[in-house]
Amino acid sequence: MRRVLFVLVFGFSLSALPMLAFAQTDDAPTQPTDPTPVEFVPRYHTVAEGESLYFIATFYGVTQESMQIANNIADPTLLFVGQQLLIPAADGEIVPTNYAASFGEDIDIIAEKFGATPQEILRENHLLSPSSIVGGRPIRVFSRTGSSTPADAPGLPHVVQAGETLANIAARYGLTAAAIMQANDLQDGLSLYTGMRLRIPTFTEDDYADIPGLWQDVRFNNFPIRQGDTVALYIEYLEPGTPFGRMTSASGELIPLRFIPEGDGYTTLIGFDAFAQPGEWKLVVGGEGDARPWDLFETEFVVASAGFGTQYIPIADDVELRNTENTFLNTIFIDSNPEPYWTDVFRIPITGSVSAGYGDARSYDNGPIYAFHSGIDFRGNIGTPIYSPAEGIVVFADELGLRGNALIVDHGMGVMTGYYHLNSFDVAVGDTVEPLQQIATGGDTGLSTGPHLHWDLRVWGKAVHPTRWLERLFP
């Protein structure tokens, strides 16, 4: 709509200019001519002796990062004399950026968001076809909108029903047939068929997703994905039914999806732990329809490495006991209330500094690495108060071999928080807890090198990064 208004105002201004000239002179008005489009001419710099990428970027008033993206330079120290470097325009004519495509964003939509062309995106990324774009994998885009932030590409999906014509579809949405044809690259109004998906170019809060068939929406509400992330997936289908789905990695790791109703569709939470395989994953969703099975929707996406490190713990670990304890706890972690209990962003459970972060692989007594730190360790004295981060129900409060005195709270929708090495409990199994209610005191029980709280957060059994839940409201 903003583009349409701009064209109308610009066209009106041009048409008014000859009339103003005629009122101020006796000369016959000249007919306006169409302005000649100006092609962007990129600037290049030839590297001289002693020049660094930072020096060149500063000289032209651009960032070193944009220089690296524009010239596909991984190591900024590897320049050579005589090298030709593209200078991204400082006035916003062209802004190099890396963009991670979401589900349903085809190459045409991405090009529209950045004022680029599909052919340019394919060429710059050495892609053989538009289908080579994978959700979450960064692609290089030369934005001609003056910003590295993608512009809106709004629209509503419409699935053509039997007997519908382009004229009555346009009338339904208060548009012209030409506008719908242009948004869908239709050559004429006779190429519609039953079940065809159209993009209706009207204002919405969400970007249009080019997904097949009767699917109205399939989207991650936080994207791209890294190891340790919690991800909310929302789906919506045109016909009623019961959804199902799964995610699988290239190595065969399987994450089943458990949906609950939300609005006109369904949502679920998915946890990717610190050992989730980086690289391509596959999403498959479908449904048992009331009238007929839902069409399967399949797509690939990327899980990025979070760059976790390694911790060396100077005490021995009982591997057999750890495996037994993990197996027992997993039966608790996956037995969650389907609906969420929490209503706000989670709170931090203890006032103390962090002694060990989430995600690092662990070696015990210089042994092999077979586990990662599933939560966050907070320093504290014996008796330090520990609080609930959100609403929930206590589902476990007892002593374990490795984790010592352990407390587990179910927050619903597959989300559970665990509190280990405790000194004492202030609640019991079955109790309902509220945000910032004291639930335990810190201690030094189980496999521990000193008084501290180990706090972890599980999503359907997957240990995810807890601090992400302190930063935003899920789902």
Image (spheres, helix red, strand yellow):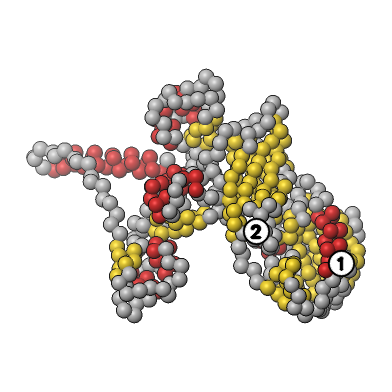
Mark earlier in primary sequence (1, 2) = 2
Q: How far apart are labels 1 and 2 at the CA level?
A: 26 Å
Mark 2: which secondary structure? loop
- Would residue 114 be found to the left or right of residue 415 on screen? left
Task: Give me the residue at 29% from left, 54% from top.
Answer: 40
Quadrant hosting residue 263: top right
- Would residue 70 be found to the left or right of residue 45 on screen? right
- Would residue 189 be found to the left or right of residue 399 on screen? left
User: Which label was assigned to residue 420?
Assistant: none
User: Which label was assigned to residue 321?
Assistant: 1
The residue closer to the viewer here, 72 or 219, is 72
Count of labels shown? 2
Q: Quadrant of the N terminus?
A: top left
Task: Give me the residue at 72% from left, 77% from top.
Answer: 312
- The image shows residue 63 at horizontal and vertical percentages of 41, 68
Q: Is residue 128 above or below residue 52?
A: above
User: Residue under circle 2?
Assistant: 277
- The image shows residue 107 at horizontal and vertical percentages of 46, 45
- The image shows residue 74 at horizontal and vertical percentages of 46, 67
Task: Give me the residue at 33% from left, 39% from top.
Answer: 8
The residue closer to the viewer here, 189 or 419, is 189
The three-letter amino acid code for the residue at tag 2 is Gln
